[in-house]
Image (cartoon, rainbow, N blue to C red):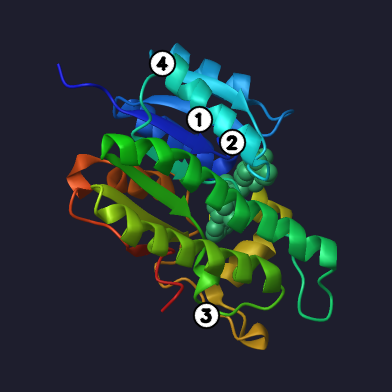
Amino acid sequence: MAPHDVALVTGAAGGIGRATAAALAREGSAVGLLDLPGCDLDGVAAGLRRAGLTALPIEADVRRPDEVDAAVESVEARLGPVTQLACVAGVLAPGGLLTTTDADWAEQFAVNSTGVFHCLRAVARIMTRRRTGAIVVVTSNAAVVPRQQMLAYAASKAASTALTRAAGLELAGYGIRCNAILPGSTDTPMQRAVWPDPAAGVRAALDGEPETYRVGVPLRRIAAPDDIADVAAFLLSERARHVTLQTVAVDGGASL
Ligand SMILES: NC(=O)c1ccc[n+]([C@@H]2O[C@H](COP(=O)([O-])OP(=O)(O)OC[C@H]3O[C@@H](n4cnc5c(N)ncnc54)[C@H](O)[C@@H]3O)[C@@H](O)[C@H]2O)c1
């Protein structure tokens, strides 16, 4: 029997992270679920185990390199060699150039950019020794399309997108693939937090907002977390064995 995959998913208690962990587990991976203390990681793990799948909850903060290194060690010790990494953890604090505080700027870079660096570095150290592995980083279509009130978020996501591709170039010689997924509006707690009125938020996202120079969603739907998770699972699978250094927008065409 071929050795099974072992995945580490960050942000695994959130909307897209939870769906990504479930998609990978359904495809046969044993999954390490990483998120901050206080999130319902045990609930996510219990749900997967009830379905006969293998899941290990791990409390860690991606801002802390020591905690990320320890999380990877723990997955290796308890589930086996890590072959898949999905960096999904992220934070969004709306704000523009004149309204973003130093703290909001620093926090979004700490999680969305530096956190991704910590995770990629930790798994790359072990994947390069074994010369195998696949990595997906969930960034945002805000990395490539200017958006009002998303100044630091967009900049931090552009940084993690560039980081993913640069790491992918370095890791390609080891047979390790690295791709970024750029979601658009996806129905998760993060998205709902920026929609004080959900019905109006959905309408504005689908129709676009001329006053903020924002185009709508050509496919006229808000993504479900599974829409992003399915692409992540594909990119982390052998079916995508010749795909690396790519940025894949999963946004219904919103970044046209
Ligand atoms: N929802 C959207 O519309 C949308 C659009 C584009 C990109 N994204 C990106 O998708 C990813 C997942 O977002 P989501 O919509 O599922 O949001 P979410 O808020 O539901 O989940 C984010 C998860 O990240 C975790 N997290 C935050 N800081 C962390 C840290 N320091 N260490 C470890 N975990 C941490 C949170 O606890 C949470 O569980 C994020 O990177 C987000 O930027 C989301």
Q: Which of the numbered marks, if any, corresponds to residue 68?
A: 2
Q: Secondary structure at mark 1?
A: helix
Q: Is residue 91 visible?
A: no
| Residue type beneath disc 1 | Val
Q: Considering only vertical position in the picture, is 124 above or below 72?
A: below
Q: Quadrant of the N terminus?
A: top left
x, y (%) of residue 245?
32, 62
Labels 3 and 2: the sequence-earlier one: 2
State how far apart marks 3 and 2 are (Cα).
Answer: 38 Å
Q: Is residue 239 left or right of residue 128?
A: left
Say which residue appears at 83% left-offset and 61% top-offset: 103
Instruction: List the residue tagged with mark 1.
Output: 72
Q: For mark 3, does the 10 Å Cα neighbourhood hold few (<14), some (14 to 19), or many (20 or more) residues?
A: some
Q: Earlier in the sequence, mark 4 or mark 1?
A: 4
Picture quarter containing residue 197?
bottom right
Question: Residue under circle 4?
Answer: 51
Q: CA distance from mark 2 to mark 4?
A: 27 Å
Residue at image point 60% right, 86% down: 213
The residue that mark 3 highlights is 215
Question: Which of the 4 quarters of the picture holds residue 251?
Answer: bottom left
Distance from the alpha carbon under mark 1 to that under mark 3: 40 Å
Helix, strand or loop status at disc 4: loop
Amino acid beneath label 2: Val
Picture residue at 43% right of the left edge, 26% below the top: 31
Query: Gap between marks 4 and 1, in whole Å?
Result: 24 Å
At mark 3, the secondary structure is: loop
